[in-house]
Image (cartoon, rainbow, N blue to C red):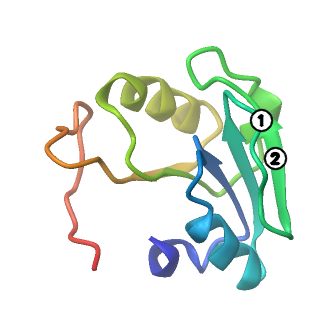
Amino acid sequence: MVSRLSDRERVVEIGIGRQPAVARALAAAGLDVTATDIHERAVPDGVTFAHDDVTDPDRTVYTGADALYACNLPPELQRPALSIAREVDASFLFTTLGGDPAVVPVSREAIP
């Protein structure tokens, strides 16, 4: 995920949870990174946190982002996340967890 996003300037992670590795790596690479979650989360240095629910988003959090991304995004959040990405004219990249399907149109790519 990091290599696919490293050429962007500003990215937003949807649902950082307790896995900040991607946000940390992107911030270390010099990107402007905002991480969102519905729960307050500690984020790495260089990452801005925004309390937000992608099913009822604050569009100002996402406006100006080159890309929105999510790791292990559950099916029920894929449509709302894609919708906000389209609204703010940002790319949308995500991974799923285990056997969860993608429920939005995708171009699949294996990530090592």
Dot 1 amino acid type: Glu
The numbered mark, 2 or 1, whose residue comes first in the sequence reads: 1
Q: Quadrant of the N terminus?
A: bottom left
**Residue 34 falls left or right of residue 11:** right
Location of the C terminus (image quadrant): bottom left
Residue at 13% of width from left, 44% of height from top?
A: 99
Which is more toward the observer, 87 or 24?
24
Q: Which mark is residue 88?
A: none
**Left or right: 94 with respect to 68?**
left
Q: Is residue 21 above or below residue 90?
A: below
Of residues 34 and 89, the one nearer the viewer is 34
For residue 49, which numbered disc appears in the image? 2
Marks 2 and 1: CB-CB under 8 Å? yes
Q: Residues within 10 Å of mark 1 (few under 14, many from 20)?
A: few
Q: For the point 86% across and 70% down, which residue is it?
A: 45
Q: How many marks?
A: 2
**Which of pointers 2 and 1 indicates the residue nearer the eye?**
1
Task: Tell me where residue 24 sits by quadrant.
Answer: bottom right
- Residue at 55 percent across and 38 percent down: it is 85
Name the amino acid, label 2: Phe
Determine whether 60 is above or below 30 in the image.
above
Q: Residue furthest top?
A: 56
Q: Residue 107, percent across and down?
A: 22, 55
Residue 101 lies, in percent from the top left, at 17, 38
Q: Position of residue 61 (x, y in %)?
A: 79, 37
Few, some or many residues within 10 Å of mark 2 (<14, 14–19, 20+): many
Disc 1, SS: loop
State the mark number for residue 40: 1
